[in-house]
Amino acid sequence: MSLRVAGRLVGAFFLLAFVFYGIGSALAGQFAGTTLVVLNSVMVAAISVLVFRALRRPHPGSAWTYLVARCAEAFLLTAGIVLRDRVGAGAADIAYQVAMLSLALGSLPFCLALARRRWLPGWLAIWGFGGYMLLATGATAELMGVGVGLVLAIPGGLFEVVFGLLLLVRGFAPSTVAHPGAALDGTSNADTDRDSRAGRAALAAGLGLLSMAVLAGLANFGVVERVSTDAAGTTTLALSNGRALVLAVVALCAVVCLDVLVGWALWAIFADTHRTVALLSAWCRTGYAVVFAVAITHLIAAAGLLRDDPATDRISPSVNAQISEFQEIWSLGLILFGVHLLLVGWLAWRSPAAPTWVAVLVVIAGAGYLADSIGALVSAAYTVEVAAVTFGGEIVLMGWLLVFGARSRSHRRSGVDGPGARPAQLEAA
């Protein structure tokens, strides 16, 4: 499929998504409305795939970020419709605002990539970037209970209409004559510089794991566990717990997106070691992320219940039940996560780049997650937490990725700025 055709399809899907969601949300609670919202999610996912195919070589970081962010948006919009019917309007609104936050943050690098490729006029790229910044601000304010999201969403919404119409006319094509070499940006690096690609992927994966550790720790231990303890009998202010739980939902949704990105970054690192096993490990982590996302919908339901009934000073049993469902589903998903770590450990053991002791510790960490998840599944009396001891393998993996990525970047710089760089440039000239 040519870039022009792909771009026209993206433009058509942008406009159709507007129509589907607008009419579907107006018919909330009816079968036709639910069907249209689901079709909107299909359009959003299709947009992300087409954009990914167009940008993955010249701008892989932007392409992956946009793909994951918009797929998260599609999932959350569909989940919001289900939650409206089962839980109430509060949960549906939280899911929608988190979806808009995902759309906005994922579209920022997308707009920058479009500007660099000259697929958008400069003024339109600036409009899009500013519009998505306002959308992210409005969604955040709505999640915190400040009702300004609709006003701040207008510039971004108008941009998407103009952008869709522009793409429908001409597809992905430069708006002006591109600068020399623009058409070649990034097209050959992935094939001719595998070490450089692996180094960038390692640095991205290491930073992703570091961000996930912070976000998941604050969300789970700082909020979810505390609210669960409150639900067991401690009197608290439900409204403040509701806001904290919303922040935990946002953090854990970010962790889900990072899980997918880290999984495929690890694939890029180890694909040359054993492509099939690397691919299987990436899909295992992606599958885990999907299960984790399903679990998070129960946290969204709990936060929605607290938002719909803020007058009470005690956490209701229904909130406690939703949090318990979250923990049980997450535990099941950790089986896939454990398998992923076992495969990554095997790949690290086979790879000449990774030390053997790193591979061993990663395998031990994966075995710990498997033991805990399967043990809890087999017997309700299982109370051992093996992963609390073996999780150090993940920290070791993160440290190795950061060091490996930093060293690769240093080698690339020394290769460019070293003694042989200038003569080579002069010879090329």
Image (cartoon, rainbow, N blue to C red):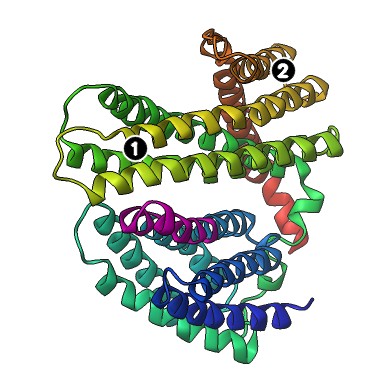
User: In the structure shown, which secondary structural element does the residue marked by tag 1 occupy?
Assistant: helix
Please provide percent x and percent y for residue 104. Answer: 42, 62
Residue 94: quarter of image: bottom left
Residue 426: quarter of image: bottom right
Q: Quadrant of the C terminus?
A: bottom right
Q: In whole angstroms, how far apart are the C-alphas of marks 2 and 1?
A: 43 Å
Magenta segment main secondary structure: helix
Q: Residue at the spot x=36%, y=24% of the render?
A: 221
Residue 105, relative to residue 130: is it above or below?
Answer: above
Disc 1 target residue:
318
Q: Is residue 127 visible?
A: no
Q: Quadrant of the N terminus?
A: bottom right
Q: Which numbered circle lies on residue 159? A: none
Pick the front one: 178 or 264: 264
Mark 2 or 1, nearer chain start: 1
Disc 2 target residue:
359
User: In the structure shown, which secondary structural element does the residue marked by tag 2 occupy?
Assistant: helix
Amino acid type for the residue under numbered disc 2: Ala
Please provide percent x and percent y for residue 329. Answer: 54, 33
Q: Residue at the spot x=74%, y=35% of the render?
A: 281
For disc 2, the neighbor class at 10 Å (few under 14, some 14 to 19, many from 20) is many
Pick the front one: 345 or 418: 345
Please provide percent x and percent y for residue 184. Answer: 72, 68
Pick the front one: 13 or 308: 308
Q: Residue at the spot x=13%, y=44% of the render?
A: 311
Q: Nearer the viewer, mark 2 or mark 1?
A: 1
Q: Tell me which segment is drawn in magenta.
A: 74-95
Please provide percent x and percent y for residue 304. Answer: 32, 49
Amino acid type for the residue under numbered disc 1: Ser
